[in-house]
Image (cartoon, grey):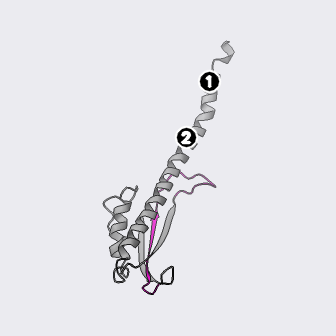
Amino acid sequence: MKSRRGNNLIEFTFLVPWYIFLFAGAYDMGIYSYALIGVQSAARVGALVCSTSSSTCTSASIPCGYALDSLRGLPNVGSGTTVCNGSPVTVSASYVTGPDGATNGAAQVSVSYTTPNLVPIPGILPGTYTATRTVTMRLRG
């Protein structure tokens, strides 16, 4: 049995890179999924605020504050981010024709978020990911 003493160590060294790859992929997918959920929520909250009147959906500063509050838990947003016109968060708001052709129109809010550099998985996950969601909500006034 002396000739089989190192087999466990050899098998372990072959499998460690796969385990690291698996855990890095699971971590990255978690960050990407959390970013998608956060961006969708931020766009929905921004559209809800903008749908109160047609004057609130002409400026992106109002939904920007609400979107940033929704995205505070994301890795590179934090409390230091105060503007929504560049990386990592971009918010735009506009007044558009309603989705059902309503005469009073709708508010459309688009939120984009760029993740920090993570471990890229070639062919599956890029190093950074930009999640963009747009919500159109009929004016309530």
Q: Main secondary structure of the magenta part?
A: loop
Residue 10, position in %: x, y? 63, 27
State whether residue 115 appears in this view: no
Residue 35, position in %: x, y? 46, 58
Query: In what element is the residue under mark 1?
Result: helix
Q: Residue 82 bears which disc, if any?
A: none
Distance of mark 2 from mark 1, alpha carbons? Answer: 18 Å
User: Between 137 and 81, which is closer to the camera in this rendering?
Assistant: 137
Q: Along the horizontal axis of the image, is 55 left or right of 135?
A: left
Q: Quadrant of residue 76?
A: bottom left
Q: Amino acid at mark 2?
A: Ile
The stretch drawn in magenta includes residue 120: yes
Q: Quadrant of residue 69?
A: bottom left
Query: In what element is the residue under mark 2?
Result: helix
Residue 139, position in %: x, y? 40, 79
| Proximity of marks 2 and 1: CB atoms separated by less than 8 Å | no
Judge whether 40 appears above or below 16 on screen. below
- Disc 1 designates what residue? 8
User: Between 128 and 101, which is closer to the camera in this rendering?
Assistant: 101
- Magenta stretch? 102-127
Q: Amino acid at mark 1?
A: Asn
- Disc 2 designates what residue? 20
Judge whether 16 appears above or below 93 on screen. above
Residue ID at (35%, 59%): 72
Judge whether 137 appears above or below 71 on screen. below
- Quadrant placement of the C terminus: bottom left
Count residues near mark 1 (Cα–Cα under 10 Å), then give few for <14, some for 14-19, many for 20+. few
The stretch drawn in magenta includes residue 117: yes
Residue 17, position in %: x, y? 59, 38
Q: Residue furthest top?
A: 1
